[in-house]
Image (cartoon, grey):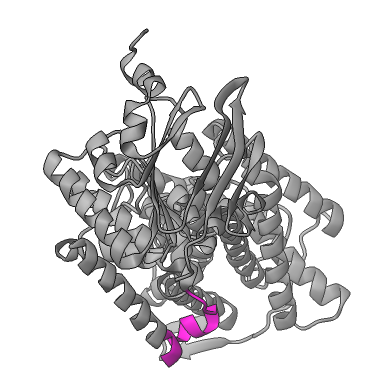
């Protein structure tokens, strides 16, 4: 049997991992709400974010935080360009075409990253080392704690952004009725591209924060598929649902790996299938149906 | 509110795959006037609206509002010239409340930056209160106070029509394009709409351009009427003149000589 202190430790690590999935899932949900596109290349934004921070700190000798800031912003710009130059043209085509296009983007980004940054795994120096200990039981490495803190900051910031700012309210309006939004003076196309930028930026931040914890190579974007599973578990239409689903999956994973080594690595998808059987809309479904 | 301008449409044409949906149509709408466009189904009435509000790009012709060349603007800039519109099939933010819909109607008048929004600074609070006050004026004018916090999806059809009109008014337009304001309404609701439109016209001084089938409503509120058929202009004049025009009668009733 697992000692209790290990249970706590696995749970905390799981929450941190789940938050990383959650940050990626935020982008999935934002883009889906704005355009009803599921971006299967979203994990690749995260991978690019990790490489961008790595490249900036190695090539220019910048510290972690300046590289983090510039790296995330540049991947945000990439997200904007992907929508403004390409995705915008395919809106209205069949879901299958859009699906294949985003999958193709995943391949292209992986190939580009490999060609530019190399195919070997690289490691990134952590901005903080050491661990936080509360009593004897609770112990967490600073780099993992940082992921949790960053998730809280992003979620609060996004909530305030969508509730308070003219821009955020305009984005919500456009997601409900684009035609009406146009005639209220809302530049819908630009806002959709901004949503892509925001989603890419947050995913890149997740990649950059995970980089010191794991290693960086071109395949880490596959984490995006787990984030997608988490978002489906929680309910795809809701930011909080997606986040909750991702944390759930993050916590279940290490325990499943320990107790059920037979399904190591696929427990996220097993959970997803179970939830789809019982509650096809996810644990926290969107409170309304989107107008079709 | 900016002062109403003259809307001038000259030689406007649009083709969809070889079909002339609108062909060489010209008309002017004077400031403060109520102008109705009538015609049988498929005559091109809504197409003219969609051209003015920049949803469609005309094949040829020009549209000016005052000095402003509308064809130089994207659809989301039209409201900034003072032109508002409603839709035949009602385009509201279905999952939001009436109040939220009306506040989005104020979008074009909000000049703010995300940073101060985020912190909800006193200036933001003050401007929110001002926008809310404007919205409440419109709620009073159209008597929709009882629906203020209802979700659009839960409202009856007639109430949604009123809310859409209210939202368009919240943008403080100087000219309003009304696409079939009475379609789908019963007689009583149609009477209400004509009453509200009179208010809008007299209290707010807004130029009204409407597409409408209901000839009673047109006769009650319109100063001038334009009849079109098959994308072409048949007649422009007072409601009575147009009603008695033989070409119009033929188009509507299929009367042959």
Q: Nearer the viewer, residue A159 or A173?
A: A173
Near-viewer residue (B11 or A225): B11
Residue B118 as seen in the image, left or right of residue A102: left
* Residue visible at 49% across and 78% down in the picture: A153
In the figure, A20 relative to B61: above or below?
below
Image quadrant in which you'd find residue A203:
bottom right
- Magenta extent: B110-124
Horizontal and vertical percent for residue A232?
41, 49
The image position of residue B222, as x and y in percent, is: 32, 46
Q: Residue at x 75, y 45 (%)?
A: A108
Residue found farthest to the left = B188
Dominant secondary structure (helix, strand or loop) of the stretch shown in magenta: helix
Residue nearer the viewer, B8 or A183: B8
Q: Is residue B100 above or below residue A234?
A: below
Residue B154 visible, this orientation: no
- Place residue B9 in its image quadrant: top right
Residue farthest top in this picture: B257
Q: Quadrant of the N terminus of chain A?
A: bottom left
């Amino acid at each position: 049997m697992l000692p209790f202190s290990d249970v706590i430790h696995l749970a905390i690590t799981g929450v941190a991992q789940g938050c990383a999935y959650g940050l990626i899932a935020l982008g999935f949900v934002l883009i889906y709400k704005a355009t009803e596109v599921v971006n299967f290349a979203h994990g690749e934004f995260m991978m690019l974010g990790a490489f961008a921070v790595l490249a900036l700190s190695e090539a220019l000798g910048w510290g972690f935080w300046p590289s983090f800031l510039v790296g995330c912003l540049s991947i945000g710009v990439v997200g904007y360009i992907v929508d403004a130059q390409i995705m915008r043209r395919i809106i209205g085509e069949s879901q299958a075409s859009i699906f294949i296009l985003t999958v193709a983007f995943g391949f292209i980004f992986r190939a580009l990253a490999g060609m530019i940054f190399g195919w070997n795994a690289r490691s990134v120096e952590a901005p903080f080392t050491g661990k936080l200990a509360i009593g004897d039981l609770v112990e967490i490495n600073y780099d993992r704690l940082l992921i949790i803190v960053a998730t809280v900051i992003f979620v609060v910031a996004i909530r305030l952004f969508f509730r308070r700012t003219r821009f955020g309210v305009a984005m919500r309006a456009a997601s409900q009725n684009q035609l009406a939004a146009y005639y209220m003076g809302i530049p819908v196309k630009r806002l959709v591209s901004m949503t892509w930028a925001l989603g890419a930026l947050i995913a890149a931040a997740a990649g950059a924060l995970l980089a010191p914890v794991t290693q960086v190579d071109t395949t880490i974007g596959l984490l995006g598929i787990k984030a997608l599973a988490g978002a489906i578990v929680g309910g795809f239409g809701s930011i909080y649902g997606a986040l909750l689903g991702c944390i759930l999956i993050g916590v279940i994973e290490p325990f499943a790996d320990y107790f059920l080594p037979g399904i190591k690595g696929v427990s996220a998808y097993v959970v997803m299938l179970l939830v789809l059987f019982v509650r096809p809309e996810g644990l926290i479904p969107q409170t309304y149906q989107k107008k079709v | 509110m900016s002062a109403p301008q003259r809307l001038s449409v000259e030689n406007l044409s649009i083709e969809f795959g070889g079909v002339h949906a609108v062909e060489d149509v010209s008309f002017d709408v004077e400031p403060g006037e109520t102008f109705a466009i009538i015609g049988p189904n498929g005559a091109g009435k809504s197409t003219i609206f969609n051209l003015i509000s920049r949803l469609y790009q005309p094949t040829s012709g020009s549209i000016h509002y005052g000095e402003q060349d509308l064809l130089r603007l994207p659809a989301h800039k039209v409201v900034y010239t003072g032109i508002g519109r409603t839709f035949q099939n009602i385009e509201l933010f279905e999952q939001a409340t009436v109040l939220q819909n009306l506040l989005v109607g104020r979008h074009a008048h909000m000049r703010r930056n995300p940073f101060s929004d985020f912190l909800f600074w006193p200036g933001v609070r003050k401007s929110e209160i001002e926008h809310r006050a404007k919205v409440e004026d419109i709620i009073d004018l159209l008597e929709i106070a009882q629906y203020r916090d209802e979700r659009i999806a839960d409202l009856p059809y007639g109430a949604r029509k009123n809310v859409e009109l209210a939202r368009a008014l919240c943008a403080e337009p100087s000219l309003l394009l009304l696409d079939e304001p009475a379609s789908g309404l019963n007689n009583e609701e149609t009477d209400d709409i004509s009453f509200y439109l009179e208010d809008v016209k007299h209290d707010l001084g807004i130029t009204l351009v409407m597409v409408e089938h209901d000839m009673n409503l047109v006769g009650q509120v319109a100063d001038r009427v334009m009849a079109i058929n098959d994308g072409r202009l048949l007649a422009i004049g007072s409601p009575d003149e147009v009603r008695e025009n033989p070409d119009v009668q033929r188009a509507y009733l299929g009367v042959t000589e």
